[in-house]
Amino acid sequence: MAPAFEDETASETNFSDVEQLHKSKVTVVGSGNWGSVAAKLIASNTLKLSSFHDEVRMWVYEEILPSGEKLSEVINQNNENVKYLPGIKLGKNVVADPDLEHAVKDATMLVFVTPHQFMEGICKRLVGKIRGDAEAISLIKGMEVKMEGPCMISTLITDLLGINCCVLMGANIANEIAVEKFSEATVGYRENRDIAERWVRLFSTPYFMVSAVQDVEGVELCGTLKNVVAIAAGFVDGLEMGNNTKAAIMRIGLREMKAFSKLLFSSVRDSTFFESCGIADLITTCLGGRNRKVAEAFARNGGKRSFDELEAEMLQGQKLQGVSTAREVYEVLSHRGWLELFPLFTAVHEISTGRLPPSAIVEYSEHTPRLNVLEGSAQYC
Amino acid sequence: MAPAFEDETASETNFSDVEQLHKSKVTVVGSGNWGSVAAKLIASNTLKLSSFHDEVRMWVYEEILPSGEKLSEVINQNNENVKYLPGIKLGKNVVADPDLEHAVKDATMLVFVTPHQFMEGICKRLVGKIRGDAEAISLIKGMEVKMEGPCMISTLITDLLGINCCVLMGANIANEIAVEKFSEATVGYRENRDIAERWVRLFSTPYFMVSAVQDVEGVELCGTLKNVVAIAAGFVDGLEMGNNTKAAIMRIGLREMKAFSKLLFSSVRDSTFFESCGIADLITTCLGGRNRKVAEAFARNGGKRSFDELEAEMLQGQKLQGVSTAREVYEVLSHRGWLELFPLFTAVHEISTGRLPPSAIVEYSEHTPRLNVLEGSAQYC
């Protein structure tokens, strides 16, 4: 390609080159179920929108398939991730790339969508290997909540790579979006509205409606804390308490999610919890989802079979995030003297460790302090 | 009873008389399923709390049972509403009274819980028959939304009877609360926090947690508008679109409930929609409930069988509020030029009248104006 700006009387071809230079190049870092769906969504838009390069590069953690073929090669031959999203065409402009450094080197927009435990390692490998003007977005749910505060994936990316990072969360069951069932998502951004709008354009389709809110922490915390509420909802299901009680528990859960997030980050906005990342993702997770399912089995067994045992039996090696997040949240609450302010979060942990019976999920004493004492009290943080 | 204050050196008995005079006397106007459960909740508290008379009077619209006995007499003999809440003891201090005027004449706290279409007639009968210092609360969901604005039941009571009226709404399936499954409710009050707290004390039990918010209109509108969203959720179920889409539709529905209420009443608060009357009641109604159920059947039949026909077949004479509320809301939106701002409410009406196919419930154009243009725009009202 001719270098841009070499001649002030640039030809049309050169104009086009300049345009090319200013187009955003997208790389998706991750190619699991959700990563593949994200690549599909994005690839349908980069073809249509002139501000993006058509090609979407997707980093694939290489695997050898039972056929002996390499996963990345099969994806490129068939435009299909036969292992993690079989039956769905990703778009011919999705290019699988097993070389992480190569996949990211020209990207101006990096979409991170890997299991959260791999992110620290991936970021460390990427130091010095990405463009300085790159923008990032994290689709990764389930950061850890450490005693000193949550370890946000978006913060990890910014800290290790020195780039701005938005997040995208919402009620997003990958397989339903893959078949183009209507859904929504929320982009959380920090300051730059223009960048947020670029992400919104990159992801939005008529069946996937994306909105942006200036609240990275609120959006990202929703994606993690909802799993604790899903455990509570599963207990209610296991105890066969009916929709009324389940709705009450989900509401109290959302309220605690909001209060907890606001205590940790005074910038978190109430309105974020009305977005897809808040109420909608909570509903999806409490209706379906593995956290709810295993918690239901736990309650049906009267708490006599441990979560570890049920997980091993029901999830084929996958682990429940809700139980570990509940433990992490409990440690924060305990450390800060907030246990009484969060009766639901507290009960989830105490039930899952066997200290309380599953029925304790609805045993709110009349004397339990109401969470509305927390309303607007971010100054506690 | 000796008249109070007759003697300044009052005996202990007279002190007790004075106390009695200042105790609140509660009458429940209505004795259907929810009315009977309300009487049970209240009666358990009046026995415990010294600021209330033990006795709870319950007006019963007299009916002759198949046995030939009068309903009110059977209730008083058995402490059980054998017709509308069989199998549940109401408490011995609940007194069924078939004489409306007699039932209300000494009451200082009037709990209205009748079908909404009877309220105007009841209020007209009560003019001049109640105490001037009486306080009212309405548990009645489903007021009408007229072109000039919603016809709130609480306003009807205040206008016709000249008394203050709070509301109590929430995720309240009567039969689940009757068997003391955990639930919540929201009291909406206008100005007087003390009165609201008296209502909260009257209804709260360890399994029925009540909070108060200063937002009568917001709380009352939730109880009506949720039925429109439940119709939308039913369409999604009938189309088998999965939890993800359903959660998105419920979220968009809540957002339109909020925006519509705020456009009509600038006093409505966002936070009300996080209460039991908002999100929790919406969840319950969209998971179970007859609006959802009939709408599901409507969508399964591709809209080829009308709501009238399905109602007749499925509901044994009961009518769906959601469909008529959707029509009323549509008229307001159309009259005020707001149709485009409320794509979900609009679609529900257009689908239920056969103008659009059920699948239109998720066909949001990319060009649909987003409701966030409404955020904080109560000045449109």
Image (spheres, coloured by chain):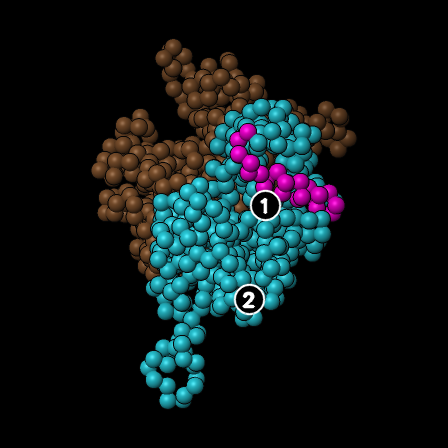
Chain colours: A brown, B cyan
Where in the figure is residue B107, as x and y percent of width and height? 49, 66
The subunit carrying tag 1 is B
**Residue A198's image quarter?**
top right
The secondary element bearing badge 1 is classed as: helix
Q: How many marks?
A: 2
| Along the viewing direction, whichever of A265 and A371 lies nearer the viewer | A371
**Residue B153's image quarter?**
bottom right
B376 to the left or right of B51: right
Secondary structure that dominates the magenta span = helix
The secondary element bearing badge 2 is classed as: loop
> Are there few (<14), some (14-19), or many (20+) residues within 10 Å of tag 1?
many
Q: Judge whether A129 appears above or below B265 on screen.
A: above
Whether residue A62 is visible here, answered yes or no, is yes
Q: Which mark is residue B225?
A: 1
Where in the figure is residue B370, as x and y percent of width and height? 65, 42
**Both marks 2 and 1 on one chain:** yes
Q: Are marks 2 and 1 in contact (CB under 8 Å)?
A: no
Q: Judge whether B112 appears above or below B67 on screen.
A: below
Where in the figure is residue B2, as x and y percent of width and height? 40, 80
* Residue B182 highlighted magenta (yes or no): no
Q: Which residues lie in the magenta part?
A: B313-336
The subunit carrying tag 2 is B
Question: Outermost residue, top direction?
Answer: A67
Q: Check disc 2 and report the residue beneath it.
A: B130
